Image (spheres, rainbow, N blue to C red):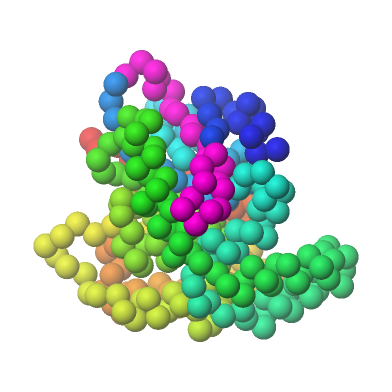
Amino acid sequence: MSSMLHGCLTDTDYFELTALSGRRYGVWVTTPPGYADTADPLPLIYVLDGNFSVGLTAPLIVTQADPYLKVAPYIQISVGYAGEEAADWERIRNRDLVPPGESVSEIMVSTLAAARDTGAMSQEQMDAYLVELADTRADIFLDFLTNELHPHLQSRLRVSESGHGLFGYSYGGLFALYAWLRDAAPFSTFGAGSPGVIATDSQIFNLIDALPGRRTDSIASRLHLTLNEAELLGTISIYRRLAQNVLTVVDRLQDKGRSLDVSSALLRETHVTGLQASFLDYLKGCHSRQE
């Protein structure tokens, strides 16, 4: 499935890479309009949850040619799962995108139980979902992106020295927020769409507490947060919890004096429809051409 998807996307190639951890990932490489006609190196924008997100985000690479926008040229790198794991990406992503030590909140368990009771998932699927949340290793996945995948891409693409970005949505947004708090190189911008900060005792808050104040003598990486109106004001409790916790994240970052490094937007979307809108908002806000 994942290896065939790229055939439907313009200017997109697909390959698979086995990490040092033994996990195998699918990688979609989408080049911009006119890429073959220039020798200029370009920044990479990594997009998580590639099995689902590539079809929604990769087509937006044409925004670089939109005369009404100022999106700078980039190469999109969508990262997902390969082989048999591709079909179970929604479950397996929990392992890679959630920070180590993150607790499983009661609201998450009750939401999964409600899905089971309505027939949206089986007890077996619920148990498997919780198994992945029991031992989360975003640290290992981040090391793969920065120390394995990025050097590999540098060897096969025309990659610039700076300007790289990382975008994720939901648990992918949680991962992007986690990576920003860890000041992960080589990224200079981070897009966190509806980041899945579900637990009130999330590891994210511990990382914010340990965050140093802003240094005026250095260039800080930029974080762009988005939420959706339906999450903040809607009737689904787990999304309201997510939105409340993200607002707490913003408050604590302001208390740390880091508000200049953070931008945000409230989108008129739902959690389901917000991915593409969030990515576009990130591109327009964090990856614009320098005039």
Return the x and y of residue 218 as percentages of the image width and height.
Answer: 15, 60
In the image, what residue occupies the spot 65% across and 39% down? Answer: 2
Asked if the stretch drawn in magenta spans residue 24, the answer is: yes
Return the x and y of residue 130 as percentages of the image width and height.
Answer: 69, 72
In the image, what residue occupies the spot 64% across and 34% down? Answer: 3
Camera-nearest residue between 127 and 104: 127
Residue farthest to the top, as pictured: 37
In the image, what residue occupies the spot 39% across and 40% down? Answer: 152
Q: Is residue 100 visible?
A: yes
Q: So how many labels did they put on this image?
A: 0
Return the x and y of residue 256 as percentages of the image width and height.
Answer: 28, 77
From the viewer's perspective, is residue 94 above or below residue 186? below
Q: Is residue 217 left or right of residue 114?
A: left
From the viewer's perspective, is residue 75 above or below residue 23? above
Q: Is residue 282 visible?
A: no
Q: Is residue 101 left or right of residue 284?
A: right
Q: Which residues are magenta?
A: 16-38
Residue farthest to the left, as pictured: 217
Return the x and y of residue 31 as percentages of the image width and height.
Answer: 45, 29
Q: Which quarter of the rendering shows the N terminus?
A: top right
- Residue 210 image-quadrant placement: bottom left
Q: Which quarter of the rendering shows the C terminus?
A: top left
Asked if the stretch drawn in magenta spans residue 257, the answer is: no
Q: Is residue 179 left or right of residue 8?
A: left
From the viewer's perspective, is residue 64 above or below residue 57? above
In the image, what residue occupies the spot 34% across and 66% down? Answer: 182
